[in-house]
Image (cartoon, rainbow, N blue to C red):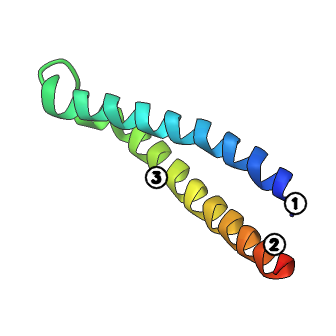
Amino acid sequence: MTQNDIAFRMDELRNDVEKVDSLQKVLLEVIFQRQDMFALDECEWAFVLLGDLTFKLKNELTELTDAAFKNMREGA
């Protein structure tokens, strides 16, 4: 993976992280500040989505980190 590939993929992942952050803020609002308006079981899908997104991000960041260190070793 080239440095260019890594940079563009990191930019895409940054957008995904912003989505995760927004989802987390909504969940926090619903759970702790709007309990009277929403039943928690109605938010189950959001927790599934949050788990899927964080798992994907973790794996992709691991792949990018490995690629970046490989590039550094090969360039040294």
Q: Residues within 10 Å of mark 2 (few under 14, many from 20)?
A: some
Which residue is at the far front? 76
Name the residue located 12 percent from the left edge and 21 percent from the top edge: 36
Q: Nearer the viewer, mark 1 or mark 3?
A: 1
Name the residue located 70 percent from the left edge and 63 percent from the top edge: 64
Viewer-proximal residue among 56 and 5: 5
The disc label shown at residue 65, or none: none
Residue kind at label 1, given as amino acid type? Thr
Disc 2 and disc 3: Cα gap in Å? Answer: 30 Å
Name the residue located 20 percent from the left edge and 34 percent from the top edge: 31
Give the labeled residue for mark 1.
2
Q: Nearer the viewer, mark 2 or mark 3?
A: 2
In the image, residue 21 lies at what x, y percent?
Answer: 42, 37
Q: Secondary structure at mark 2?
A: helix
Residue 45 found in image quarter: top left
In contact (CB < 8 Å): disc 2 and disc 1: yes
Give the labeled residue for mark 2.
71
